[in-house]
Amino acid sequence: MDKIVSLCRRRGFVFPSSEIYGGLGSTYDYGHYGVLMKNHIRSRWLRAMVQERDDIVAIDSAVSDPLIDCRTCKLRFRADRLEDAQCGRKPSKRPGEFSECDLTEPRQFNLMFQTQVGAMEDASSTAYLRPETAQGIFINFKNVSQLARRKPPFGIAQIGKSFRNEITPGNFLFRVREFEQMEMEFFVPPDEAEKWYRYWIEQRFNWFVNLGVRESMLRVREHDEDERSHYSTATSDIEYLYPIGWQELEGIANRGDFDLTQHTRASGTKLEFVGQDGERFTPHVIEPAVSIERIFVAMLCDAYDEEVVGERERTVLRLHPLIAPVKAAVLPLIPRDEGITSRARELFEELRKRHTVEYDDSGQIGRRYRRQDEIGTPWAFTADEQTLEDETVTVRDRDSLAQERLPIADVASWLDAALERPWRSPKA
Ligand code: ATP
């Protein structure tokens, strides 16, 4: 993990936050390459979850959570001050003392960041930053199912920041206090829940494999009964063998009808599916939930490699080309040669319209290749003297180091096709 952290810092993927003020523990800022890589992870998830399917729609809900402390009287109490609080029912008692009191779990509160909404600092203005994006999906169930005219099975997907006041953050980005979650709630007829639960475990596992994560480093672990949340009928983790051991990368839970039932009870709005023929039921929910941070760390760990090539050491990130921050570098072999640089520059201008590419004309060619290897750039196109004679450039492959010549005119379509090709890690 130390090597990954140091590479991330050195090459501007991730910095410790507020570094000039001594750093804010376990908080990180993303630099240029980190942002590009996160964007690729995000867009691949959206593509698999929304763009390539007809049964899932997207949503973006507020970050302050609608959670209520007591589901019966709908008042909100601070879990650490229950002793001083009064329940909303008469005669007044402390929260939890009436048999009807239905308090949400205190663990969530201790984990949540409290903030104030509006100008008044009384209890009614207290809000919490969401510890998961899921609730924003459930409370919009009615809107989406009516407006999008969906019949289960259908899903709602959301990407957004979640906040948890983790007691022991650490291991780089693995456990942080603010992270970006990608969650999808898939609403299904109750008797199909088990089938869809298995389906989503498989889909999500394959998503990682198809984005180049080595299968030998992934496993599915089903939770024991005592490990599961009280409302979940089944939960499986897709685990990755991080440098700290096998750990949860993504969770897939069969949440039953718990969430829709609870929100129906608390809000008074019926959250159920009503068909035209009068059919009605409360859908069950299958939830794949993951953070970009845990994927980011897993993909970097999986990609990191060191090797000696011709007595020279190189560090290389063997990232899937679709995840690599930069897709290709364009390099003029002799930076002082105006003919060569202008051809290279033209190629660069053409490619950058379609992909994130870099132009680099500083330093020896070997050093320029190694800089690109370190950030995981899969291909480098180099213009040299021959380019001026026959309008070709070399393409160098990051993993095999093989070089071949291509007509400049074909480079753009060659790159498009190369990005579409399946890719498996040579480390496997
Ligand atoms: P853990 O047991 O590791 O704390 P969890 O079971 O509480 O995780 P979930 O509530 O299932 O996690 O959250 C869903 C997903 O969100 C996790 O699989 C993980 O990818 C991500 N996640 C949760 N907490 C964090 C965190 N503090 N930092 C980064 N990602 C997180």
Image (cartoon, rainbow, N blue to C red):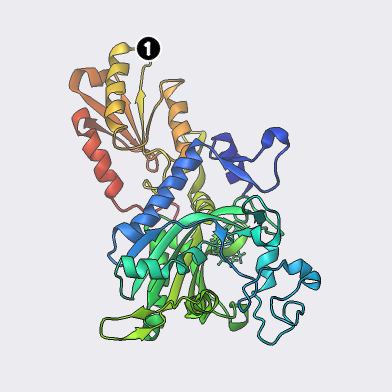
| Left or right: residue 353 compared with residue 31 | left
Q: Position of residue 365 (x, y in %)?
A: 42, 24
Task: Give the residue at mark 1.
Answer: 336
| Left or right: residue 426 compared with residue 302 | left
Q: The C terminus lies in which quarter of the figure?
A: bottom left
Closer-to-camera residue (408/40): 40
| Left or right: residue 14 compared with residue 337 | right
Task: Specify the amino acid type for callout 1.
Answer: Arg
Above or below, comparing residue 426 to residue 152 in the picture: above
Q: Position of residue 299 (x, y in %)?
A: 48, 52
At 53% from the left and 40% from the top, the residue drawn is 13
Is residue 139 visible in the rendered image? The answer is: yes
At 40% from the left and 81% from the top, the residue drawn is 193
Looking at the rendering, the quadrant in which ligand 1 lies is bottom right
Above or below, comparing residue 4 to residue 249 in the picture: above
At 77% from the left and 77% from the top, the residue drawn is 94
Is residue 426 visible in the rendered image? The answer is: no
